[in-house]
Every structure is written in C-alpha cells, then in structure tokens.
C-alpha cells in the first residue's frame, strides 16, 4: 500500500475541508499527484500545504461546482499539469438542514447542482482520460441516499440520485476498463455536520432515526475506503456502493 499511487494523478473535489481534505491527505501519503478542487481557495491552500508535507505534487483549482461552466475546467487543468488522470474522487457536497416544507427552490436547485450535476459533468470530462489509464471514479454519497432521514429530505434525494448515477454509469461503461463506485458514509464529524444548528423546532425522536449505538465516524476513517476504491488494489470492484454507516442501513 505504501506509495501505491506513485506516478498517478487524482482529482479530489471538496478538498478545502472535511472529508475532501482527509481524502487528499490520505492520497498524498500514498504518493498521488493531486488536483485539489473547491470553492474555498484559502482552505485549498491549507490542504495543499498538508499534502506537500507528504511530498505530493499538487495543483489548486478554485472552482464553484454549482456553476456548470466551471465544472468543465478541472479535468483539463489536471491533465495539462500532470499529463494524465487516474482517478476522479467526487467528494464535494452541500447540505441543507431544515423542514422540507420550508426548503426554497434556490436551495433545492443548488443542492442538485453541487451534489449531482457536478459529479456528472466532471465524469463527462474525465472519462476519456480515465479510459486511457484504466482509472476509477469514486462518488461520495451518503447513508441518507439509502434510507430516509428527517429534516434533510432534499439532501437525501441528491445522494439517492448520486447512487443511481453511479450504478447507471457502471452498467453503461461495463465494457471499458474504468471502475465506477460510491461510498455511502453515515454520520461523520465534518464541518458540514457539526455546523448544523438544531433547535426545539425539531422533534428529537425523528431527528435521531437512523442513529446507531456505535461512535460517529471520523473523516479519516472514510478517506481510507475512498483511497482503496480509487486504487489499483480495487481492480475487481465496479458498480458498488460501500456502506460505511456502522450498520444503520442494515
């Protein structure tokens, strides 16, 4: 496993913080050349510094993934920098917490833009390069895309869509060497989760449906599985959705 990504080029979206940063650092420890994508340029630079400590070559690509035109640039810049692309890790995600009846059209549309459309557009750009390298796509979905959770209905629907997208792409491109998989984490201690404010307006009985007895995951735990699926060691894994919710959806 040591330096198994040496000479390989990987795009990581959402790399400025949370799980995206953990994935980037994990891959840098394994020798990957990294293209770091996020709307938060300051956070990207912090992640870049962490990856550089591990000797990784990096490029920072500030990108608003809710803008479809902006989604067309990261792949081209990555291939221009590194000469190849071996994996696309769609980690970036957006969460809206609140009552479904109060979710605005703007919030709903942006959720789908970031959580579903961006991975699709990035795949379109990446596929010709991944086909050349027998590369991989790893989409970060959620346990919420597999089962119902209160107060995040719009978010859950995007993750369900991303799971369906993963499986459909895996079938359509079955006869190519590209591997396409997803990870579906449960609760995780990331800024997106810990920054959610819960008030007395939310029923705790409904709020904690789907919570299990085991401790909440750290992003580093999930990053290791993302790295495995992106790596050549997972050469027989295709069209899979890896649940990492400690048994909740079971």
Image (cartoon, grey):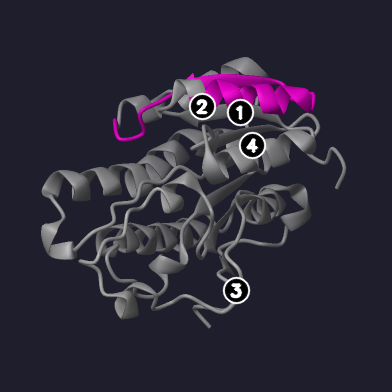
Residue 14 falls left or right of residue 225: left
- Residue drawn at 49 percent across, 62 percent down: 171
Circle 1 residues within 10 Å: few <14, some 14–19, many ≥20: many
User: Is 44 included in the stretch rendered in magenta?
Assistant: yes
Most extreme residue toward the front is 200
Q: Earlier in the sequence, mark 1 or mark 3?
A: 1
| Residue topped by disc 2 | 43
State yes or no: discs 4 and 1 in contact (Cβ < 8 Å): yes
Q: Which residues are magenta?
A: 43-67
State yes or no: discs 2 and 1 in contact (Cβ < 8 Å): yes
Position in image of residue 235 (x %, y %): 73, 56
State yes or no: discs 2 and 4 in contact (Cβ < 8 Å): no
Q: Quadrant of residue 148?
A: bottom left
The CA span between labels 4 and 1 is: 8 Å
- Residue drawn at 59 percent across, 37 percent down: 21
Find numbered disc 2 in the image and state the secondary structure of the residue it sits on: helix
Q: Quadrant of residue 92?
A: top left
State which mark lies toward you, 4 or 3. Answer: 3
**Front-most of 45 and 228?**
45
Find numbered disc 4 in the image and state the secondary structure of the residue it sits on: helix
Q: From what the image shows, is residue 92 above or below residue 224?
A: above
| Residue topped by disc 4 | 24
Res 131 seen here: no
| Residue topped by disc 1 | 47
Q: Earlier in the sequence, mark 4 or mark 3?
A: 4
């Amino acid at each position: 496993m040591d330096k198994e990504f040496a000479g390989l080029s990987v795009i990581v979206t959402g790399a400025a913080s949370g799980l995206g940063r953990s994935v980037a650092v994990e891959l840098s420890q394994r020798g990957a050349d990294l293209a770091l994508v996020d709307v938060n340029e300051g956070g990207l630079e912090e992640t870049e510094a962490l990856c550089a400590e591990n000797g990784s070559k990096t490029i920072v690509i500030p990108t608003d993934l809710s803008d479809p035109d902006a989604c067309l640039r990261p792949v081209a810049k990555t291939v221009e920098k590194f000469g190849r692309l071996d994996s696309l890790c769609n980690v970036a995600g957006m969460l809206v917490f609140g009552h479904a009846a109060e979710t605005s059209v703007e919030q709903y549309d942006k959720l789908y833009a970031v959580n579903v459309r961006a991975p699709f557009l990035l795949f379109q750009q990446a596929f010709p390069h991944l086909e050349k390298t027998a590369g991989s796509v790893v989409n970060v979905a959620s346990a919420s895309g597999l089962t119902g959770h209160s107060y995040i209905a719009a978010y859950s629907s995007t993750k369900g869509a991303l799971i369906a997208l993963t499986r459909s792409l895996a079938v359509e491109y079955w006869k190519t060497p590209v591997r396409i998989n997803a990870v579906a984490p449960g609760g995780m201690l990331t800024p997106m989760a810990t920054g959610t404010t819960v008030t007395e307006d939310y029923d705790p009985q409904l709020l904690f449906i789907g919570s299990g007895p085991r401790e909440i995951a750290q992003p580093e735990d999930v990053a290791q599985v993302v790295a495995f699926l992106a790596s050549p060691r997972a050469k027989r894994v295709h069209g899979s959705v890896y649940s990492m919710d400690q048994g909740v959806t079971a």
